[in-house]
Each structure stands twice: as structure tokens, then as C-alpha cells.
Image (tube, rainbow, N blue to C red):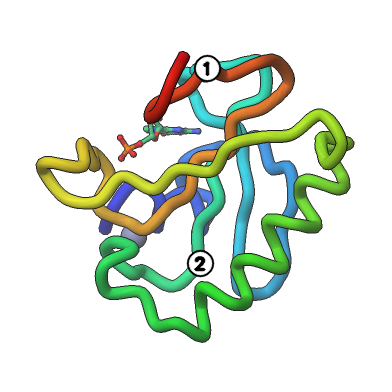
Amino acid sequence: MCIFCKIVKGEIPNKTLLENEDFLAFEDINPASKIHALIIPKQHISSFDVMPPKVMAEMTEFIQKLASNLEIKDSGYRIISNIGDHGGQEVNHLHFHLLAGEYVGRLVGNK
Ligand code: 5GP
Ligand code: ZN
């Protein structure tokens, strides 16, 4: 079983930020910014690349609610999903990173 499935089952502890029947948001163990959340479907889906569009639609609403709870809607945030080897994906259970709480720099375009 993958580590995020173990987190969903409660076999690995996590700091939960938001949860419903289908999704879980929790703090990244190695934060890259003041706020660094991981958002996952409870069902094992290996990456964004095989994610059913319906799940994306439901996750969108969940992430927007998380942003509201974290009070970052006005200040802003970034969501990222790493996909496969070239995308730098280390955990093969679909997740979005949410970075916020401070200016998180730019990955593309002008600095
Ligand atoms: P990826 O590189 O796959 O996009 O991101 C995996 C993320 O999962 C990393 O940011 C890493 O810090 C985080 N991570 C790995 N293992 C654990 C864990 O056991 N608990 C938590 N909360 N985060 C983890
Ligand atoms: Zn999994």
C-alpha cells in the first residue's frame, strides 16, 4: 500500500487541514513555504495523468474550500501537481501541493 493510502487509513499520522468523504488535505512533512498542504483523493489514483475529470471537478471545489478555511483567498496561493519521473513525482498517489502564507516565487515567466 502506498504511503498516502496509509495516511488515509490512519496508519501514518498526519496533520489534517480539511477532510470529507472523498478527499483529504494535510500538512506536508517537509514544507516548502509557510503553508504547504497536500490534497489527495482518498481513492488511490496514481497521478493527475489518469485522473477522471469528475474527480478533478470535485477536487477543485475541495481546494477552494481549503483556501477559504486557510484565509488565503485574498493573499493568493499556488497549486502544483508533479507527474511521473520528469515531473519529479515521488509519491505515486495523486496529490496537489498548495503553497501559500508568503510570496512563493515564480516557476515560469519573469521573476
Ligand atoms: P511529490 O514529490 O511526489 O510531488 O511530493 C511528495 C510530497 O509528500 C513531498 O513534498 C513530501 O514532503 C511529502 N511527504 C512524503 N512523505 C510524507 C508523509 O509521510 N507525511 C506527509 N505529511 N508528507 C509526506
Ligand atoms: Zn495510494
- Disc 2 marks a residue whose amino acid type is Lys
For the residue pair 101 and 10, the one nearer the viewer reads as 101
- Disc 1 marks a residue whose amino acid type is Gly
Q: List x then y, in percent, for residue 30.
A: 46, 18
Please name the residue that numbered disc 1 is placed on: 105
Residue under the image location 63 percent in, 49 percent down: 25
Q: Is residue 109 left or right of residue 64?
A: left
Image mark for residue 30:
none
Please name the residue that numbered disc 2 is placed on: 42
Q: List x then y, in percent, for residue 40.
A: 50, 57
Q: Are marks 2 and 1 in contact (CB under 8 Å)?
A: no
Determine the quadrant in which ligand 1 lies: top left
For the residue pair 58 and 91, the one nearer the viewer reads as 58
Q: Is residue 110 left or right of residue 90?
A: right
Asked whether mark 2 lies closer than 8 Å to ligand 2, one says: no
Residue under the image location 74 percent in, 51 percent down: 18
Q: Identify the secondary structure beneath mark 1.
A: loop
Give the Cα distance between marks 2 and 1.
Answer: 30 Å
Q: Nearer the viewer, mark 2 or mark 1?
A: 1
User: Mark 1: few, some, or many residues within 10 Å (few <14, many ≥20)?
Assistant: few
Q: Earlier in the sequence, mark 2 or mark 1?
A: 2
Q: List x then y, in percent, for residue 80.
A: 45, 43
Q: List x then y, in percent, for residue 70.
A: 83, 37
User: Mark 2: few, some, or many residues within 10 Å (few <14, many ≥20)?
Assistant: many
- Name the quarter where the N terminus is drawn: bottom left
Q: Identify the secondary structure beneath mark 2.
A: loop
Residue under the image location 59 percent in, 30 percent down: 99
Tell which residue pokes out farthest to the left in this image: 85
Residue under the image location 70 percent in, 63 percent down: 62
